[in-house]
DNA sequence: CATCCGGGAGAACGATCGTTCTCCCTTGTC
DNA sequence: GACAAGGGAGAACGATCGTTCTCCCGGATG
């Protein structure tokens, strides 16, 4: 099936693009890693830009899907919000963790690729909105939930960046601590 | 003087590298923007790697210098810490703001360039240390200052990333609010 | 005025990139 | 067994990159 081939190509592309940066990876490296002929590669994705877009799209879905599944296994409210930072910590510990794929792609191509910029923006916005939902679930109302959601997103973002640069998982715990205090204060009414 | 030429080249390189990414900018573009012959360019910086390293070194010094000067104009303590986020907000509003040069460079080249990775790590570490100093100045002691410094760095980092992606200055204010609560809690003893 | 030398413009070179094309072998069909 | 179709391997192409080299001019020196 062409579906399976497409997925194999995306698997290879994701590993390479995420691990080494997009410009540093040539189509030939993707071809080799995926074990696919160049002809088939270009049959599946008509250009590198298209492959990059598919990479970001699938990564967004999988990243948020994994996170949401992890959070759903924990009671709603304060506990579920804190579980987000547990999940981040596990992510930081994975071999090959190199920060946020969207921040990296945006930093590399954002200025010259509106599609990448839009994908990155959409990813962060969806993440922030989801956190806002969690905040509402936990008892924050209206504008308070919105504010709390943005603050939680800020903490996650900072933790991701610092974990990548430092090569340490510690920022996850630090962000979790701050999130804890914010919740304490926001939910005390 | 060769000094002035070197600075002109660095000015051009910084604008281009920061605005478009490092790999997207060729030495010829730097040459043209700086108004310098290729021969002189390679006389000043023997390779692109050397130019990139000089770019990051000078940017680190200037960025932290500007920030420290801004903070020094404000009374030490809680007020000075909050002023950091005012400075960030002004930075975010500058035309051409594209996030943290070190995070972007690391995302683009970190995997393949130990020098860039080290520069990025050093920059963040220095920033975090400086924040810890501010926290100590404000009354936090020992481990508490360290913890507060890391939390403040986390907030700043998240604000920078989200401001770049969203194209908005709002994350500076949000980070400042969180910093305010943290200070309130930490300095209440 | 003759000479020499530093530096400017940009051609040249080898590598690599994204993309397309050619050639050949395999496989399925009559 | 003949033949058409499709896909694989990789050569080929034009562009661009980092870096070096060539050629030439202008001005300082005797």
Image: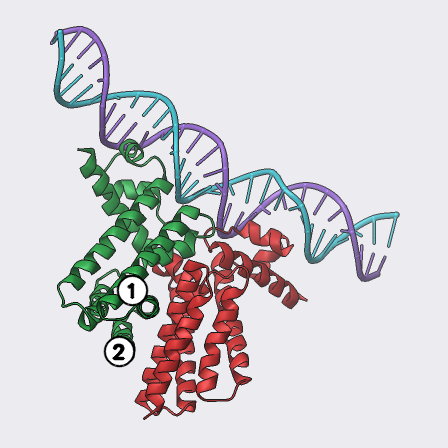
Chain colours: A red, B green, C purple, D cyan
- The residue tagged 1 is B132
Q: Position of residue B91 (x, y in %)?
A: 22, 63
Q: Are marks 1 and 2 on the same chain?
A: yes
Q: Nearer the viewer, residue B168 or C1?
A: B168
Q: Position of residue B61 (x, y in %)?
A: 25, 51
Q: Counting residues from the N terminus, which is met first, the one under dot 1 or under dot 2?
A: 1
Left or right of A19: which side holds B141?
left
Q: Position of residue B76 (x, y in %)?
A: 17, 67
Instruction: Describe the element under mark 2 as helix, strand or loop.
Output: helix
Disc sitting over residue B177 in the figure: 2
The residue positioned 26% from the left and 72% from the top of the image is B172
- Which numbered mark, 1 or 2, is in the foreground of this view? 1
Q: Is residue B161 above or below residue A39?
A: below
Q: Quadrant of the N terminus of chain B?
A: top left
Q: Residues within 10 Å of mark 2 (few under 14, many from 20)?
A: some
The residue positioned 46% from the left and 55% from the top of the image is A21
Q: Is residue B113 above or below residue A42?
A: above
Q: Position of residue C3 (x, y in %)?
A: 21, 8
Quadrant of residue A149 within the rendered picture: bottom left
């Amino acid at each position: 099936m062409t579906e399976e081939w497409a997925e194999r190509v995306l698997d290879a592309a994701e590993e390479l693009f995420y691990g080494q940066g997009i410009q540093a990876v040539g189509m030939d490296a993707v071809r080799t890693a995926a074990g696919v002929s160049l002809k088939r590669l270009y049959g599946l994705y008509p250009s590198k830009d298209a492959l990059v877009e598919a990479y970001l799209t699938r990564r967004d879905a999988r990243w948020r899907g994994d996170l949401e599944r992890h959070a759903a296994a924990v009671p709603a409210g304060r506990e579920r919000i804190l579980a987000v930072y547990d999940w981040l910590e596990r992510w930081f510990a994975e071999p090959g963790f190199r920060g946020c794929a969207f921040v990296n792609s945006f930093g590399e191509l954002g200025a010259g690729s509106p599609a990448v910029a839009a994908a990155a923006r959409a990813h962060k916005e969806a993440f922030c909105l989801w956190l806002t939902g969690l905040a509402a679930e936990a008892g924050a109302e209206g504008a308070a939930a919105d504010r709390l959601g943005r603050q939680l997103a800020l903490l996650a973002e900072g933790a991701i960046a610092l974990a990548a640069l430092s090569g340490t998982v510690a920022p996850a715990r630090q962000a979790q601590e701050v999130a804890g205090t914010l919740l304490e204060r926001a939910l005390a009414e």
